[in-house]
Image (tube, rainbow, N blue to C red):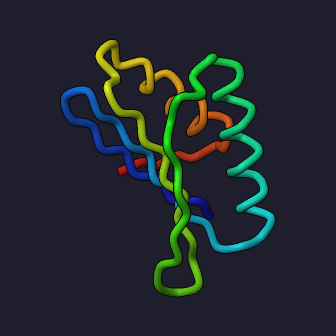
């Protein structure tokens, strides 16, 4: 199961997606690439880190997001990955 968390402050938005398996990782990475291209929003930063219980987390951050355009991208990613609960 993929876990999601969104944080947002003035001009900054971050989506963190935690996954366990290689299949989930591939789904997440492919989804991010597809959605960001579709929304013409490629000026994000991302990084991956390992966490406990064998999970990894990919973090997508938008800086200077004055118009809050990242929200549309994050919603599309969450919907495409069929994530029901986002913290």
Q: Classify 16 as above or below 65.
A: below
Q: Can you tell which quarter of the image residue 2 is in? A: bottom right
**Relative side of 26 to 32, left or right:** right
In percent of the image, x 77 and y 70: which residue is there?
Answer: 22
Q: Position of residue 66 (x, y in %)?
A: 29, 17
Nearer to us in this view, 65 or 32: 65
Q: Classify 60 as above or below 53.
A: above
Q: Classify 80 as above or below 70.
A: below
Q: Quadrant of the N terminus?
A: bottom right
In percent of the image, x 62 and y 17: which residue is there?
Answer: 39
Q: Can you tell which quarter of the image residue 19 is in? A: bottom right
Q: How many marks?
A: 0
In percent of the image, x 19 and y 28: which residue is there?
Answer: 10
Nearer to us in this view, 75 or 58: 58
Q: Position of residue 58 (x, y in %)?
A: 54, 58
Hey, which residue is sitting farthest left in the picture? 10
Q: Classify 76 as above or below 22.
A: above
Nearer to us in this view, 82 or 30: 30
Q: Position of residue 5 (x, y in %)?
A: 40, 51
Q: Position of residue 36 (x, y in %)?
A: 64, 28
Hey, which residue is sitting farthest top in the picture? 67
């Amino acid at each position: 199961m993929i876990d999601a968390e969104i944080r947002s402050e003035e001009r900054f938005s971050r989506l963190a997606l935690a996954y366990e398996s290689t299949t989930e990782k591939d789904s997440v990475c492919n989804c991010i690439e597809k959605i960001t291209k579709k929304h013409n929003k490629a000026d994000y930063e991302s990084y991956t880190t390992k966490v406990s219980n064998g999970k990894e987390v990919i973090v997508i951050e938008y800086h200077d997001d004055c118009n809050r355009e990242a929200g549309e991208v994050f919603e599309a990613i969450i919907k495409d990955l069929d994530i029901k609960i986002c913290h």
